[in-house]
Image: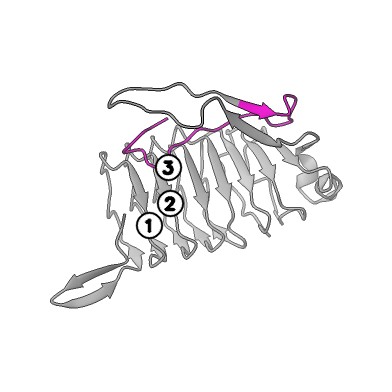
Amino acid sequence: TIPTTVSFSFISYSVTPTSTSAFNACSDLTDVIIPSSVLIIDFFAFYGCTGLMAVELPNSLISIGYNAFANCSGLTSVEIPNSVTYIGDYAFVYCDNLKIVFYNATNSTSGGAIFNTDCTFVIGTNVKNLLDKLFKSYTSCTVVSHASVPPVISANPFGSNTTVYVSSAAYTNYCAADVWRDMTIRRIETPVTSIALNVEDTHIDTNGSSQLTATITPADATLPTLYWSSDNPKVASV
């Protein structure tokens, strides 16, 4: 966990930015909790942290810099908080195992090719606009939008092979909206209502493993794909 304050010569200072290349190539770093005092993650801050599997970004965060998390090949998911107003070029490129992005930035500006891996991109309820070139053109991502009003876009910000899933109530809005109507729009006709694990708790010995099985209800859900993650990779990884 990055501290909210540091002391020097008996004086306490708030930690507000994460400086340029602060953790560059720290391959043993497995998880990071960034406190609410941090407003800016500077460029190359976590570049090449190949062991990084989990990062928690605060709702106070305003800016994610150029190449901030590039080449973090162990990262499987990331959530962009609604407070973010700027994301720099290539912020998450070459995160080869990134499977799902939760994008909640309400009204942000960004650079180009922020992501370049095929993944599921989940748009939050209050997202108002998406900038061009979120993804490199060759990617093939699945988009799930919870925004009932289509976010404003001037060009397709996703890869060339994009399927967008929206609620039945929002389907007509997306089919009529500029740029969105040129993509493949699908209704989420049968949403997931519950997910149950085969066990309520389990004990795993050091260096051991345990198999978990999930049952999705209903069985014919439109989007039945599960993404597994650990909230503490130091203790257990998936």
60 part of magenta stretch = no
Classify residue 96 as left or right of residue 128: left
Q: Residue at x 48, y 36 (%)?
A: 98
Front residue (pair 237, 166): 237
Classify residue 81 as left or right of residue 5: right
Horizontal and vertical percent position of residue 62: 48, 65
Report the amino acid beneath label 3. Asp
Q: Residue at x 60, y 31 (%)?
A: 196
- Chain part drawn in magenta: 215-238
When asked about the image quadrant of residue 28, the answer is top left
Point out the frontmost of discs 3 and 1.
3
Instruction: State whether the magenta stretch is mostly helix, strand or loop.
Output: loop
Mark 3 nearby-residue class (10 Å; few <14, some 14–19, many ≥20): some
In the drawing, what numbered circle is on residue 34? 1
Per the image, the residue denoted by label 3 is 231
First in residue order: circle 2 vs circle 3: 2
Per the image, the residue denoted by label 2 is 56
Front residue (pair 112, 171): 171
Spatial distance from mark 2 to mark 3, Cα to Cα? 9 Å
Classify residue 201 as left or right of residue 165: left
Horizontal and vertical percent position of residue 72: 38, 40
**Could one spot residue 47 in this view of the protein?**
no
- Residues tagged 2 and 3 counted as in contact (Cβ below 8 A): no
Q: Secondary structure at mark 2?
A: strand
Q: Secondary structure at mark 3?
A: loop
Report the amino acid beneath label 1. Ile
Question: Is 203 situated above or below 29?
Answer: above
